[in-house]
Image: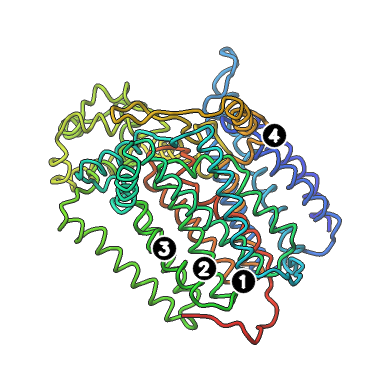
Amino acid sequence: MKIRQILIPVQILAIYCWMALLVDSDSYYAPFFITGAVGSICCCINIRDKRRLCKGKIRILCALFSLLYSAAVTAANYKIFYNLAWPADAGSFFRNLYRGISFLLCFLGGIAVAWNILSCAAGKLKDFTWPQRPHKLKPGMVFLLPVICISCVNLSVLFLVQYPGNISPDSLSQIEQSLTGVYSNHHPFYHTLIIRFFLQTGLALFGEINAAVALYNVFQIIVMSCCFSYVIVTLYQMNLPSALIVLCALWYTAMPFHIMYSFTMWKDVMFGGMIMIFLTAVYRILKKIGTHPFFNTAPLLLGSVGICLFRSNGWFAYLICFLCFALLFWSTRKRLCGVFLAVLAFTFLLKHPLLSCLQVSQPDTVEALSIPIQQIARVVVDCDDLSESQRTLLEQVANVDAIPVAYTHYISDPMKELIRQRNNLEYLSEQKGLFLQLYLELGISHPDVYLKAWVDQTKGYWNGGYDYPYWDSYVHYNEMGIVRTVNSAAVSKLWDAYLWLFTEGRVLQIFLCIGFHVWITAFLAFVSIVRRDKPALFITIPVLAVVLSLLAATPVFAEFRYAYGVFCSLPFLISAAFYSPPCRQKNSFCVI
């Protein structure tokens, strides 16, 4: 009892220090403020509740999640301690002492925040379920209504303000491939084929490139509206409260990233939709939701193939999903495991042997090496102590003297372009062993530099939120005649003001924080484990697997579109985490 009484003020002090230190973070402060405030409230609840809220294995799980969360936040904000301002005449000893104490307080404070939230959730949310109320409308009508509403909103913005859609350099590359017939799998080939179909159809119908681009965007708007509506009708069939369903519908209808992405020609948009319908379909099958097998099986297969084909890292994320699903459900769902395995094999053939036969070039070697390239470059920039043999090897693929100028800690594109300028990628491919040895040598001699380079390259996906462009709202200069047309200046001003509320308005910026939403997803996985709900746990895995793939190979530290699947899936993940189905109805059955 005495130990408990001592720990109470220590925890409160640690949470205060954590919140105070993170004021100097280079990310948005709102995620830390919200998390710290919730942690403080949960600490008070835990103090009031004299019994232990979590015991045994759950207690160990709380400790592991708390350590992971605190380590992530502390590592992501290492610059607070490394770049500490200190009077020159105060001496390095006291500077290092203060740095060490601040680091320790931040780490312990993060543990206190996460521990109190998780232990409180383990005790209070273990048996919580959404109230369920039977609905009277037919599911078909419920599916159709959101499709119409979401499509109308997006089409209105497209044709009044953003016609023919948002076109980035990546979009132009795919458009050019579609028109010339010279393809590369740098951007997913099968997504480019979809673009090609609608461009050719639009040119045949309208004879004008802008109308052809708009036709593709209309198609994408309808597809994404159907994906969103699939989630909404699933919640409806789960008999969840009407208020929860309406909030979910508003999330998909009103959030600016959903609207802007609906008419942006990016593979990441469709990829986010495929993740969403995949995890929804799997959940429907596992929880026996719905009475028609087609509406479970078709989205499952479509989402599975889309995940594997619409992003370079999608196939590996799906592989992680298969392994986790087999671990959780092998004894009862062997047929579904077989479906996952068949999709992996089928899409592998489509991505590699078939593309080779079609002479579609694959991305070059450096495209998948963003993290190692950034780590080696960071050693050159921070330490400049390469041996003669190491420098000679690097000179074969890049101008070493230009690395300090080219290196940018949050994006790998400048370094990749520096390597491409040397035009010696064949040597890099042929001498993989030597470059692997170089990578390991530098990592062993400079582990702290490697860690800092990795943190700076990936922290946008696991720490708070960062001020980095969330969407493209323009048509990039091109010689194909694609131009922006604003058909209503008044609506354009209103739309710009609406976007400003999220990008510059402090209150709504929280909805754009990638790391904060990843924290929520991890929390929902924890809740699912505590509730022993394997289906709810599994559907968090596709989202977390995509994030893990970004931590291994992302070229940009906080590219919103790369994590778009998190924002598409989160409403359903929240709903599923606290759903307990009633007894199986007579007319309900499962497929596969």
Reading the image, the residue beneath label 1 is 533
**Which mark is drawn over residue 281?**
2
User: Mark 3 belongs to which amino acid?
Assistant: Ile
In contact (CB < 8 Å): disc 1 and disc 2: no
The residue at the point 59 percent across, 44 percent down is: 153
Residue 318 x, y percent position in the rendering: 40, 62
Secondary structure, mark 4, is loop
| In the depicted structure, whether residue 586 falls above or below residue 493 | below
Q: Nearer the viewer, mark 3 or mark 2?
A: 2
In contact (CB < 8 Å): disc 1 and disc 3: no
| In the depicted structure, whether residue 571 falls above or below residue 342 | above
Q: Which one is nearer the viewer's eye here, 432 or 84? A: 432
Reading the image, the residue beneath label 3 is 320
Mark 1–mark 2 distance (CA, rounded to whole Å) = 16 Å
Mark 1–mark 3 distance (CA, rounded to whole Å) = 19 Å
The residue at the point 59 percent across, 28 percent down is: 496
User: Mark 4 belongs to which amino acid?
Assistant: Val
State the image quarter where residue 348 is shown. Answer: bottom left
The residue at the point 35 percent across, 72 percent down is: 341
Dot 3 or dot 2: first in sequence order is 2
Reading the image, the residue beneath label 4 is 507
